[in-house]
Image: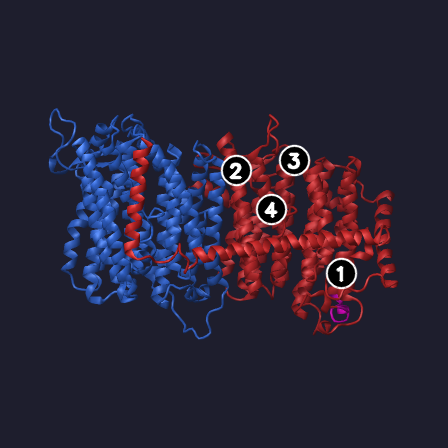
Chain colours: A blue, B red
Amino acid sequence: MAIPGLEQLPVLPVVIPLVAAPLTLLMKPGRAPWAWATLVSWVTFVVTLLLLEAVWVHGPVEYAMGGWGAPEGMSAPIGITYYVDLANALVLTLVAGIASVVFPYAYYSVESEIDHRQTPAFYTALLICFTGLLGVTITGDAFNVFVFLEISSLSTYALIAMGARNDRRALTASFNYLVMGTIGATFYVIGIGLLYQATGTLNMLDLHQQLMGQSNRMVEAGFAFIITGIGLKLAMVPLHLWLPNAYCYAPSAISAFLAATATKVQVYIILRFMFSVFGFEFAFLEVALNAFIVLGIVGMFYASFVAVFRDNVKQMLAYSSIAQIGYMLLGISFGTVDGVAASLIHVFNHALIKAALFMGVGCVVLRLGSSNFAAFNGLAKRMPWTAWGLIISGLSLVGVPLTVGFISKWKLMEAAFQTQTFIPPLLIVLLIGASSLLAAIYIGRLAYAMLLQPVPEDAEPVKEAPHLMRITMWIMVLANIWFFFQTDVTVGVATRAAQALLDTGLGYGGAY
Amino acid sequence: MSDLLAGLIQNPGMLLIVAGVIVALLPGRQLRAIAALAAIIGCYALLASYGTAPMDAPVLMGESTLFGLDLVSIRIDRLSVVFATLFFIAAGLNAIYGWLHASRMEASMGLIYAGAAIGGVLAGDLLTLFIFWELAALSSVFIVWGGGTHAAFKAGMRYLVIQVGSGMALMAGVALTVAATGETAFTAMSLTAEDGSLNIAALLIFIGFGVKAGFPLLHFWLPDAYPRASAVGAVMLSAFTTKMAIYALARGFPGEDILMLIGAVMAVAFIFFGAAASDLRRVLAYSLNSQLGFMVCGIGIGSELAINGAVAHAFASVIYKGMLFMAMGAVLTRAGTLRAAHLSGLYRAMPLTALVAFIGALTITGVPLFAGFVTKSMTISAAGYYEHMLVWLALIAATVGAVNNIGVRIFHDTFMGARSDAAKVSGDAPLPMLIAMALAAAICLVVGIQPTLLWSMLPFDYDYAAYTMDHLITQMQLILFAVLLFALARRFGLAARPRDGVLLDVDWLYRVPGRIALAGVVRGTAAAWHRLWWGIQAGVARLVKGLYDTHGPEGALARSWPVGFMALFTAVVLGLMLIVTFVAY
């Protein structure tokens, strides 16, 4: 189905940043690459918004790359297709939206943390990473997912390594991530290979048709490889070990961008494969869902406990991200519309929360040169805007009403009550509650340091972060409040998207 | 969006919260105090403009929906209005009391905290209630931290966890209610479902309320946190959290039988702990918890008179308990300590504060002409009228206990007698503190002399005569008997003046009916409690240490592992996945 009047729209979110990226490399170091990247992110954001609206109104959109669609009499297209339904339209909008706020934010932070001469390369890598994330989300071709996954990963390794100017440990963090990310991608591509062997197709919709009723060792092994591969990229416990250091030592703007987008895109891929490609007919899905409950709950607690004891705020937030991924897995594991919707809602809301938090930490790193807890002592007096932004988004992480975190938690609890898993629903709800207590502890610790600890006596006076950083950070903070009141976008879209995913999973075909 | 926001903004509590944020940005203590007082008066005017409505025909305002659930921002009826009015009075007194001494944080968070409590009692549905419930928890923890010491930080952390835990229990209960019925309305519910089984949703909500109401064994945050706040902060804390929970119980669980038992235990048990405490504000905190027992009992009895009694006592209790906390805060401000063993003879330096403490003692012990007399006798009468003998005895015992804890320890031992070194202070309480205390004392007297003023605000029309010969004689006998015991015990040296604040200073009270047995009970209870408490503390400390060893920066679970190990681990996970797949099918 095409969109009347805007037939080329689905390809634009990938083409625009992809074409823009190499041009950035030719620019003079300084303002120009930054301004260009920002402009590109804004244009892309507008395009994704149009796409979301079109999908909401007209239903899923299919776009055959180069016109290589399905010939007469064949079900599968010959070439690559892009397939956009509400689930990935929502994630696309999210990724582009976060980029359009984080890219302008990056300017001062990058100026201080990265060699001036490297700025064109930095923004080039950033745009390529952006392209990769959008491509992974938008494509309807399983192998194309791998290609974009590698595009985004390779540029991410480079971006994380650029943190080495501040802290040499960024190099080992990046190297570890490179090894682990490559293993993950390899597993994924092996899994795709096995599926191709079994079905002879790489198109996701066609894969679903071909796999219906097939359940043999090859498909099962393919499934295991794909879930492990994506699980690694997703930082699912116990495959999370690469994440804390990667987020901690990356340049601040990169931490904010990756924490808000990279793992979220992987959650989408897991959803897509579990429900759209394999579906409930596939017997092993149940086993995987049960495994996700356990891994989700273990992650929620284990990572939160680690976060409580961390002395570096960036690492604390990184571990908190691993715990939050536990919530998303838990939502998926319910295998219901409400559960998947809760997971998608949390994908969206957690992106807003973590972007705001990492941006706040970036402001502190810019002015005080450190993200250790000691740097946050008395911050409310030294940098009140930053401190209060951190507190509000921290409250959102805990799940306090009037912030989006509450919507996530509420929806997850509501979904939990309506499930039949091997763990009693009430226990799951109480565990969700208990793990938010842990979030209250580590955020409380941060709030106490900022509000009530005295400023160190020998501290030199500092200025607030530059206006640009403060404004962009506060856009994210206010978004945390705005989307509490405006739940149409999150709850409305996510519920319909989940409905469509599960309908496909149950074999009814795409409802939208 | 706009409905929900528009609905919330009509709630005077929400406006007060907004004002709290603005106050945080203002320079200068005076300006902040003036702004706070203006905001309180303005928001109260808004509440007053909504009027009031009878219990069976509430006025609902600010209706909206949040993902398909109906929210009602404001419910006006006589139960909600009387609590909201009470909280406005308390907020006003707090603002005056902290005129010179409230830090920026306390001035601002105090307003937000008061606003959350007001919003909570006005909330018309469970979700809105939860919103304000959480805001009250989060704003008040900053007030605990405002004490500024490391002990205050740790107590604040414990307070935060237990308060957020209360919110989680409430949220789980609400989510279960919504999942089961699709309704969010906050009306009376029951712990037993229609088929006689336990109603889990109601139980979760009940536990959520119980934590904030200081139910026994769920209460420990209260005497832990309140004494560690600053002079101004403790006054704020004493007013809102627990009374908000009392409101929620009165609304949600009137006539729930188990509440009578819980309330009776609270009323009696905490007297012993209060008598044992050495910090004077901890004595007050335990005494506050014991007074909450009166209200919980009244709600448990559930008759119109009993509910009226509980509400009236909540009203009086906020005022006089706040007043006592103010007096102790003034002592802390001047003397710098509140350890009972170091303070005596303060009346010479602080005569007006001594007078306030005296009025507070007269009120809490229920001397006629003071508010405590009229409000306590309602609940006690309700217990008697409805033949709840044990409850009646417990409430009588609690009254006698208050004579010791407040009359003797807070007033007599602190202000009278020989002057201790710590009591040689520069002067009486600062003027704004005195004004706030005087206003509170005036309210105690007005309510005591002209109780019909308060009666007209109570939830039910019930013609109750407080000043009957019967009540006067019962109450005066009780108090005079207790005072006589105290005097005799001191005269014959049976009760040494408490010096170090350990337990034994209670026992004069219980000598006549069997000194040894009762002293044994007191000691035994306290010792058992201490053993339990220390056991829990040691257990928690071990647990935290264990968690730190495994999850802390050097722990195995949080270390940075070499990349080879990570890769190996991935292979192991893949292997497991493959084995499970192949074996399972």
For marks 4 and 2, the one nearer the N-term is: 2
Circle 3: residue type: Pro
Circle 2: residue type: Val
Chain ID, mark 1: B
Which circle, 2 or 3, is nearer the viewer?
Answer: 2
Reading the image, the residue beneath label 1 is: B409
Chain ID, mark 4: B
Which circle, 3 or 1, is nearer the viewer?
Answer: 1
In the picture, residue B97 is in which quadrant?
bottom right
CB within 8 Å, label 4 to label 1: no
How many C-alpha atoms fall within 10 Å of the one at disc 3: few (<14), some, or many (≥20)?
A: some
For marks 1 and 2, the one nearer the N-term is: 2
Q: Quadrant of the N terminus of chain B?
A: top left
Reading the image, the residue beneath label 3 is: B54
Circle 4: residue type: Val
Reading the image, the residue beneath label 2 is: B174
Magenta part of the chain:
B344-352
In the image, residue B92 above or below residue A288: below
Per the image, label 2 sits on a secondary structure element best described as helix
Using the numbered discs, state the Cα–Cα distance from disc 1 to disc 2 in whole angstroms: 43 Å
For marks 4 and 3, the one nearer the N-term is: 3
Using the numbered discs, state the Cα–Cα distance from disc 4 to disc 1 in whole angstroms: 28 Å
Residue B349 painted magenta: yes
Mark carried by residue B211: 4
